[in-house]
Image (cartoon, rainbow, N blue to C red):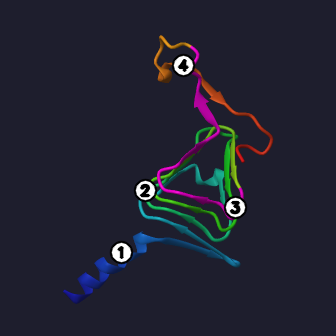
Amino acid sequence: MVNKIIGHTYNFFSCLFHRIKGKKRTIFIGPHTRIKNPSKICLSSDVILGRYGYLSVHSKNGNISIGERTNIGMFFQIACLSSVKIGKDCLFAANCYIADFTHEYKDINNPISKQKIYVKHKAGGVE
């Protein structure tokens, strides 16, 4: 019985923060944070991603880059079609949304979800 409790406790705490260690590099990814296309996402050292977040790259050529010592609060969403680049030493509160695209809103007679998606093209992405 004790081993069962210890096993459940370990599983709970291992889900609390995933640690990725490398050379002078620690990254915290909170529980229930989802990452779509992880090969297109670069996280620098000492990055903290809060729980229930979502990182997603929606295209083959897109990428997300998050700089050193950046802390992003819980319930965040970062999405890109082209490029999103967040510098070092940044701090984001909970419930933030960051993207390099948006829906156009030119025709007020059509719902915004039915209108074109506009991608912000800028050298270096969204900074």
Q: Nearer the viewer, residue 66 or 108?
A: 108
Q: Furthest residue to the right?
A: 123
The residue carrying pointer 2 sits among few (fewer than 14), some (14 to 19) or many (20 or more) residues within 10 Å by Cα, namely some
Name the spot of residue 62 as percent of width and height, x first: 68, 42
Q: Which of 105 and 80 is in front in this view?
A: 105
Q: Name the residue under label 3.
A: 67
- Rounded to the nearest angstrom, the CA distance separating label 4 from label 3 is 33 Å
Magenta stretch, residue numbers? 87-106
Kind of residue sitting beneath label 3: Gly
- Rounded to the nearest angstrom, the CA distance separating label 4 from label 1 is 45 Å
Q: Name the residue under label 2.
A: 52
The residue carrying pointer 3 sits among few (fewer than 14), some (14 to 19) or many (20 or more) residues within 10 Å by Cα, namely some
Q: Are marks 4 and 3 in contact (CB under 8 Å)?
A: no
Kind of residue sitting beneath label 2: Tyr
* Residue in the image at 70% along x and 61% along y: 67
Mark 4 or 3, nearer chain start: 3
110 left or right of 12? Answer: right
Q: Quadrant of residue 15?
A: bottom left
111 left or right of 123? Answer: left
Task: Name the magenta segment's main secondary structure.
Answer: loop
Q: What element carries label 1?
A: helix
Name the spot of residue 66 as percent of width and height, x first: 66, 58
Label disc, if present, on residue 115 of the rendered structure: 4
Mark 2 or 1, nearer chain start: 1
Residue 96: in magenta span: yes
Q: Do the residues labelled 4 and 1 touch (CB within 8 Å)?
A: no
Q: Mark 1 points at which residue?
A: 11
Kind of residue sitting beneath label 1: Asn
Mark 4 or 2, nearer chain start: 2
Kind of residue sitting beneath label 4: Gln
Q: Furthest residue to the bottom?
A: 2
* Residue in the image at 47% along x and 71% along y: 17
